[in-house]
Amino acid sequence: LDDNQRLDYGDTVGVSVSVKNIGLQPTSDVTVKLSTNSKYVTITKDVASISSIQSEEVINLHDAFSVVVRDDVPNETKVEFVVTCTNGKDTWETMFYEKAYAPILAVNSVRMPSGRIVQPGETETLEMEFKNIGGATAYDVLTEVFSSSSDIEFKNTSILTEEVEAGETFTVKTEFTVSSSVLVGSVFEIMCS
């Protein structure tokens, strides 16, 4: 795999394969093909060649193949790859598995740092804490806060966090004002993607 040895969502990854001739005779003009049935991975470079390989010899095909992982791959998806080698008359096949990783953003808490109940006509700060519980770094995380009620007005409705590593917790803050005529039960929504 590529430098970080992983399949991360949205990545284009170089895949290396080592081929060993376990037969007693050398062989030549070997075509090596990489394939998968995973709907989350597209192989963009799937064929490599070996001009000749001696008995017991190992040929390393460094970054000979290339795959693209979809952005919507679920975290820790197991991807099966099949390596097929043929010299035109004999065919050998083996498979290997790799996990694909993606971020998962979870809400830890939503609170007012002052700890008090907001009264009609007041302005307060809303503090939202999230955690990336997935297996990959999330980039350009957009937190949006909105209300269908005109009684709650947010200073910033969209807040961008550039990078959140796997396991990292991050906090987003925005001020909001509650109108003096706010109705009990007025709500707001939070979305983080």
Image: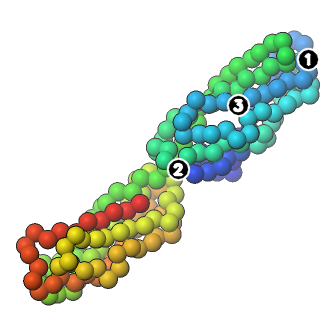
Answer whether residue 125 is visible to the viewer in this image: no
Q: Which mark is residue 69?
A: none
Q: Is residue 21 above or below residue 141?
A: above
Q: Amino acid at mark 3?
A: Leu
Quadrant of the image containing the C terminus: bottom left
Q: Earlier in the sequence, mark 2 or mark 1?
A: 1
In the rendered structure, the answer to whether residue 134 lies left or right of residue 82 reads left
Residue at 73 percent across and 35 percent down: it is 46
Q: Amino acid at mark 2?
A: Asp
User: To which quarter of the image does residue 173 belong?
Assistant: bottom left
Q: Position of residue 28 (x, y in %)?
A: 91, 21
- Of badges 2 and 1, nearer the viewer stands 2
The residue that label 3 is drawn on is 34
Q: Amino acid at mark 1?
A: Pro
The residue that label 1 is drawn on is 26
Q: Earlier in the sequence, mark 2 or mark 3?
A: 3
User: To which quarter of the image does residue 148 belong?
Assistant: bottom left
Q: Position of residue 169 (x, y in %)?
A: 40, 64
- Asked whether the residues under the numbered discs 2 and 3 touch, taking CB atoms below 8 Å apart as contact, a structural biologist would say no
Q: Earlier in the sequence, mark 3 or mark 1?
A: 1
Q: Position of residue 10 (x, y in %)?
A: 57, 51
Residue at 45 percent across and 65 percent down: it is 141
Answer whether residue 97 is visible to the viewer in this image: yes
Q: Disc 3 and disc 1: Cα gap in Å?
A: 22 Å
- Asked whether the residues under the numbered discs 2 and 1 touch, taking CB atoms below 8 Å apart as contact, a structural biologist would say no
In the rendered structure, the answer to whether residue 167 lies left or right of residue 148 reads right
The residue that label 2 is drawn on is 71
